[in-house]
Image: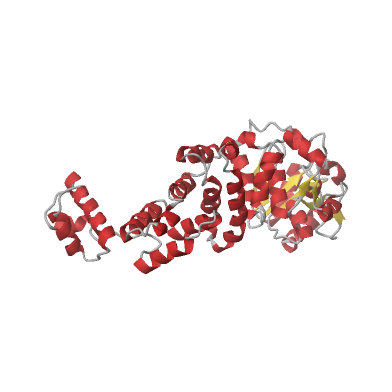
Amino acid sequence: MLDALRPIAEAVRAHGGRALVVGGYVRNQLLGAPHKDLDVEVYGLSAAELGGVLREFGPVHAFGRSFPVMRVAGLEADFAPTPDREFATAARRRDLTINAIGLDPLTGEILDPLGGRVDLAARVLRAADPRTFGSDPVRGLRVVQLAARFALEPDAELRALCARLDLSGLPGERVKIELDKLLLAASQPGRGLELLRELDQLRVLPELGALAQRGAWERARRALEASASLRDGIETGARPAFAYAVLCRDFDSLDSVRRFLERLRASNALVTQVLALVADAGAPDQLVSEDAPARSYRELARRLADADVTPALLATVARAHGSPHADRFLAAFSALGIPDAGPRDVVLGRHLLARGFAPGPELARILARCRAIQDETGWSDPEAILRRALDSPPE
């Protein structure tokens, strides 16, 4: 990605400025971790001058008012003019020393005025400037997810700073951004959960605090830790539902799960998926241990399909929580020939319309009986199912 940035950096230099890569890209590169998005601070140019330079390379989208950030179409990089004349001054406005390291894309020079590289080597998290660390309360959650992602330890001063943060006014969307990184990218998400408690960050997440009160904290921590090794086997699009279901499995009610996710401004689709996975979280062990009939498996597959999740995903949530029956649970679906998308209705409205039934409540009741018969028997012949449904009394 730096190759694509260099022509822009050269143009910035030609106009009397300097472009430096900052933040997560530099940190991750030094850690040998994956890195993609580029944050670029530009010194010596006004916002208008920077916009003029960037437009030489394509359409420019700008957002933000006080400190506008600009992006060139087709390039995953954010450019921001900085009011500071020196990088060392700008570095102190950042949250942590490990995020206050700069890289000159033209020379390869590393700028590290606050000792971030030493802290990375020591696996320590330190505030870039303790006097201004609390200017953005979300930094407390950022400390948690960074510690969990990269096996770093906050120093005593940073711990005290985090504990004093007032998180009450944080928008749910900002909280979720940091939780997503903890749940979906951390190698030690269970350690992150523990840090939330140690750093007194649970004030903004009362449902998590309730886990400790109910004696479910350690179980949730172990499950989150186990989820990291299971995450890669799940399709990318299903990972958020998996991660949040693992976290929420031991909440005291589905209403608590819903409140938690809605406070985070989670999408309706994610809320539906997580609720479905939590509602049937005990099904893998229950169905196997009770030697449940095929109908129970088919009905479960339908419920999960309605929420756009699969038995395989439910089984993986169960594995994270230590289920001894997850493999046998999935084997039962395979033996019964139940697809991930759930059984498709064999008898449809058109079959009844062809027999002279009119649309209405009675037709819906017959279709429901047909579905129940199909789930009970596994039949695929619509005529056989219809004959039994029409001969049986309404439920």
Would you identify the image quadrant in which residue 136 lies?
top right
In the rendered view of the protein, which quadrant contains the N terminus? Answer: bottom right
Q: Is residue 258 above or below residue 40?
A: above
Report the coloring of the rendering: secondary structure
Question: In the image, what residue occupies the spot 50% across and 60% down?
Answer: 324
Question: In the image, what residue occupies the spot 48% across and 60% down?
Answer: 326
Question: In the image, what residue occupies the spot 40% across and 53% down?
Answer: 304
In the image, is 233 to the left or to the right of 156? left
In the image, is 211 to the left or to the right of 75? left
Q: Give the x, y percent position of residue 38.
A: 71, 54
In the foreground, 125 or 96: 125
In the image, is 395 to the left or to the right of 268? left
Q: Give the x, y percent position of residue 297.
A: 36, 58
In the foreground, 144 or 252: 252
Does residue 122 appear in this view?
yes
Does residue 60 appear in this view?
no
